[in-house]
Image (cartoon, helix red, strand yellow):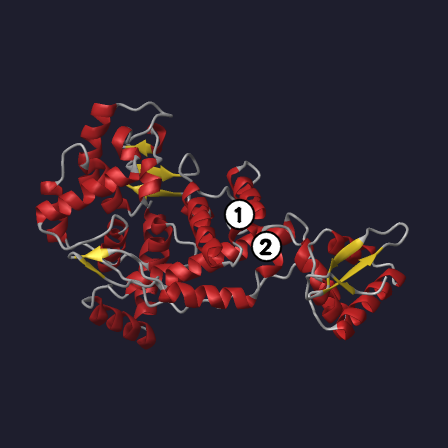
Amino acid sequence: MSPYRRPDGVTFYVDLRWQGYPRVKMSTGTGLKGRAIAIERTLYALRDAGRRDILELLAAGRLRLGDVHDAYCRSPNDLEQLRARVESPAVGVLVDDWLTYLRSPAGISPHTKRRYAPQSIRRYAASWEGFFTVLPQGREARLSDLTRGFVLDYLRTRQRAVSGKRHRRKAINIPPTPATLNRDLAALGAFMSWLRDMKGLPIERLRLPRQREPVGRQRWLSSEELRAFEQHCPTDWWPLFAVLFYTGARVGEAQGLRGADVLLHSKRITIHEGDRRVKSAQGVRDLPISASLERALGSHLALVHPGPSELVFPGDAQVYWKVRRVWHEVLRAAGIAPATIHDARHTFGVHAAQAGVPIVRLQKLMGHATPVMTMRYMKHSPEAYIDQDGAAISAHMDGAVDQEAVARATAARGGIRSA
């Protein structure tokens, strides 16, 4: 049957039936008879080529005749792309499967070789909620919609977004920081890697345009601020904050400490993989207990008396938002400029550098994966050592150090003979 037009219609229709093929009865989407005839010829060509897959998608209403005809006339590759776009699964379902995988025992990070932290999973989920607001079909968008063009549209949309936050009773526009956008892009990249590596889907990971981030802030407390903090800190909260200040441990690491991890007699705290996972293999380490920290922990352990497998800081200390609330209350009471809990770690790093701790040992104490991360504290190393360093280098170049070494070796040999 040639293309026909309904009595009260404007566009032409086709109605084709072949044995073993689905019936194709639908509008051509055009009122031009010449184009309608060309579309019908395309359908016959697809039948002769055995493209049952395309005809089934047409019969199911998942493809439009005009789109199929145009793609067929341009190139067979365009027809394949059209089919792949339609058959691509919904992104929302795949993202749900991915997040479920991350929460399961099988969810292992390819970088750290460890389970994903709950905070990381929540951050991934939040990033995808933002992607769904930009995708034209939201959660029903197809995998083929995740293109570089979409990524660029997302970045432009987010950078124009209004945060909705208020400051001093006036609305202000606060676009997301480059670090926030990079975290979103990381969530997209991790999802696509999972589709390729775990689901076996033949997709190529996009080249994501990373945003240039400014040099990170580094707030740390001076010795005067540290004393003021201790004076205004509630007695039952000071031991936790003292661990953060005097060891440089992350708050999650301190919250995960068990009784067997804190050895006052050995003056050691052991950080290992437990309820609160370390960020990398280098995070597994021993930390020293200074005299100030020993006083704080001694009274706390006598009061809590945790068993070997029991938490050193139980109760409210396990709830991050409560820890943060107390932290800021102490800062306000002590008149200390704003700082974050993580700045307690910066405080340890800066004071260690100012005390002359070598970068290699400081890297171990901080649990940094690379010395590059530790180098930011070296700018705080004391200038008082410049003259000493210069003198030591000059003595070595002049051979004075070698003479001293010979003298020490000779004295040592003499001591051995006399013994």
Q: Is residue 62 left or right of residue 388?
A: right
Would you identify the image quadrant in which residue 101 lies?
top right
Q: CA distance from mark 2 to mark 1?
A: 11 Å
71 sits left or right of 131 in the view: right
Q: Position of residue 149 (x, y in %)?
A: 54, 68
Residue at x 35%, y 59% (from the top left corner): 374
The residue nearer to you, when weighing 231 against 282, is: 231
Answer few, some or many: residues within 10 Å of disc 2's Cα (few below 14, many 20 plus, some between 14 and 19). Answer: some
Image quadrant of residue 312?
A: top left
Q: Which of the pair 283/46 is nearer the observer?
A: 46
For label 2, the SS is: helix
Q: Residue furthest front?
A: 7
Closer to viewer: mark 2 or mark 1:
2
Left or right: 281 in relation to 198: left
Q: Earlier in the sequence, mark 2 or mark 1?
A: 1
Return the residue at label 2: 193
Q: Residue at x 43, y 35 (%)?
A: 274
Could you tell me which secondary element the residue under label 1 belongs to?
Answer: loop
Query: Can residue 290 be seen from the camera position used here?
Result: no
**Residue of label 1:** 109
| Residue at screen point 50% across, 41% down | 115
Instruction: In this rendered view, identify the residue nearer to me: 137 or 169.
Output: 137
Residue type indicated by callout 1: Ser
In which quadrant of the rendered image does the N terminus lie? bottom right
Quadrant housing residue 31: bottom right
82 sits left or right of 260 in the view = right
Residue 164 x/y as whole percent: 28, 56
Label 1: how many Cα within 10 Å (few below 14, some 14–19, many 20+): few
